[in-house]
Amino acid sequence: MTKVVVVGGGYGGVTVAKGLDPVADVILIEQKDQFVHHAAALRAAVDEVWEHAIFMPYSNLLKNGQVIQGVVSSVTGTTVHVFGHDPIEADYVILASGSTYPFPAKYSSSKATVAKARLEQLHDALTSAGSVMLVGGGTVGIEMTGELASAFPDLEIILVESGDSILSTPGYTQELRDAITEQLDELGVRVVTGSPLAYLPPIQAGQLGRFSVQTHNGDQIEADIWFQCYGATANSGYLAGTEYEELLHPNGTIRVDPTLQVKGHSNVYAIGDITDVRESKRADAARQQARVVIANITHQLEGGEPDISYQPTKEWVILPLGPSMGASQLIDADGNMRILGAEQTAEIKGTDLMVSVIRSQLNLP
């Protein structure tokens, strides 16, 4: 049977592995011992109940294939090298290794028990803190602001954004910014925009300890704990020194064709955050890309050509501000932009954060 190796068990990786499991010998390689639902990680950072909800086993994902917990050291051709394992010779390789992001939006530990222990330390620190500084006024910084404000209503929150406004990157409407700004004001959040910090705090992010910093504009900020809410980096280091290195952009993403085949390699695909597809890196986009790869590899297995191209969809922005607040920017079937308020945003994502959807995908009760 045709052997398919999937590198990475995030949103795209589990989708493509599960989709190809009935028609190929699938091996999913993931360095973490459990799936981490990162879309709910910020809720877990403030709520001990959610600390356990975001970690889910891979044990039920594949009926025929297997999941190997390990770290990929390199990929040469369609041979995948894993530390502590013999090289795995594959017919197809799918690069789905995702990206890193500062804690607590993502966790670097390979063991769920270690990640949970760090979360417990964070909960203790936040309980003792009187004020917090979040550096970065994009979606992560805003979403974390909402979680903190909901869980710790007496906590002073300072949100620092180097741009002239929150959500300063292209793609967000002024109407969405206005809606979120109004809610931040309602929560009593101090928003500092228009200048980056002159220097970072001397204390590690996520650690309790009083500090004082200032922006280049001279705004003085004091807080007891701080978090970095920017800095996604593609996980492609294992491709350095291989034939794929020349296809990497400076930001670590890899060049792909519209079919999501890695350029010049008919049996190697890439999906999710590691690709150079020009769209925001979102879980739903990774899953959509995975479905294109499933179709193309299935066509190849049937003797055909990989003729399905991935078309980036019109992006929806679902931005919860805690369980009951937030705003969303949607595009309807006619191409018209719509802004939804707090109640509708909570219905879409804010309350459940799609945990039930992910558990179903992993074949968990």
Image: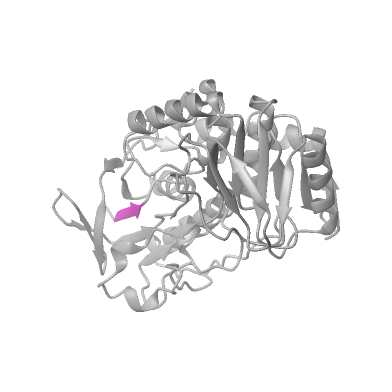
Q: Is residue 6 magenta?
A: yes
Q: What percent of the width, then of the height, locates residue 242?
A: 26, 72
Residue at 43 percent of width and 49 percent of height: 13
Q: Is residue 14 magenta?
A: no
Q: Nearer the viewer, residue 122 or 71?
A: 122
Q: What percent of the width, then of the height, locates residue 200?
A: 51, 54
In the depicted structure, whether residue 234 falls above or below residue 229: below
Stretch in magenta: 3-7
The quarter of the picture where residue 14 lies is top left
Q: Nearer the viewer, residue 178 or 264?
A: 178
Drawn side of residue 168 relative to residue 174, left or right: left
Q: What percent of the width, then of the height, locates residue 319?
A: 70, 44
The quarter of the picture where residue 235 lies is bottom left
Residue at 79 percent of width and 45 percent of height: 180
Drawn side of residue 290 relative to residue 341, left or right: left
Q: Nearer the viewer, residue 112 or 196?
A: 196
Q: What percent of the width, then of the height, locates residue 161?
A: 66, 56
Q: How is the rendered protein coloured?
A: one colour
Drawn side of residue 52 relative to residue 164, left or right: left
Q: Would residue 247 be visible to someone looking at this image?
A: yes
Drawn side of residue 339 relative to residue 167, left or right: right
Residue at 48 percent of width and 24 percent of height: 124
Residue at 33 percent of width and 60 percent of height: 93
- Give the dominant element type of the magenta stretch: helix, strand or loop: strand
